[in-house]
Image (cartoon, rainbow, N blue to C red):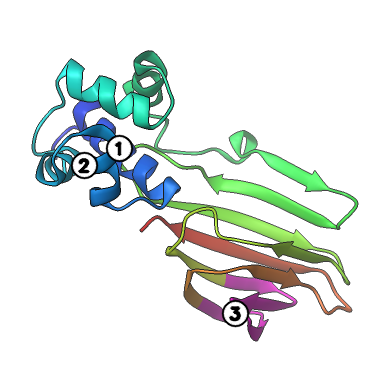
Amino acid sequence: MRTETVDDRLAVRLGALRGERGWSLDDLASRTGISRSTLSRLERGEISPTAALLGRLCTAYERTMSALLAEVEAAPAELVRADDQPVWRDEASGFTRRLISPPRPGLRGEVVEGRLRPGADITYEAPPVPGLEQHVWVLDGTLELTDDGRRHEIGAGECLRFRLWGGTRFRNPGPEPVRYAVFVVLP
């Protein structure tokens, strides 16, 4: 088994930063003056960036080099203990979110558990990353999920899979709470 290096994590992070902004390789090339082929090779981890290249990328991504490197220097724990999974509650909307498997350099997926009380209704106007892959698996109850205008009713044990291009709406039609897992995979 090959050990993941800082360069491996940096390559993944550079690709993720570009994806978060919805930029193509051509867009980034025009912003940095770095060739499309070099950017592609950097993101695939085939070459390591020079300080000059990294400086130009940091300018495009509006972060310092030290901030970028701090994001990739130490790999987070592989095992995420239940007590270390952050929980966020929005009491006003009736939504609870537990981050089961947080983002990690070198990995493209994460797992989130959501809970909605009956009648809870959450709308997201746009995807955080266009083309984001999601798998929504309902564990208990019924979830009404609208993806880019398409409405789906998902029952316990069922899974909806899609790429996120537009807005989404998560609604619990009731009468019971709904608990579901969202598997998120970066494009």
Kind of residue indicated by mark 1: Arg
Residue 1: x, y in percent?
14, 40
Q: Residue at x 44, y 47 (%)?
A: 20
Q: Residue at x 63, y 73 (%)?
A: 138
Kind of residue indicated by mark 3: Gly
Q: Secondary structure at mark 3?
A: loop
Foreground pick, 136 / 31: 31
Q: Main secondary structure of the magenta part?
A: strand
Kind of residue indicated by mark 2: Glu
Q: Secondary structure at mark 1?
A: helix
**According to the image, label 2 marks what residue?**
43
Give the magenta part as a residue range.
Answer: 137-160
Q: Quadrant of the C terminus?
A: bottom left
Whether residue 152 is in magenta: the answer is yes
Do the residues under discs 1 and 2 have CB atoms within 8 angstroms? no
Whether residue 183 is in magenta: the answer is no
**According to the image, label 1 marks what residue?**
31
Residue 82: x, y in percent?
60, 41
Marks 1/2: CA distance?
A: 16 Å
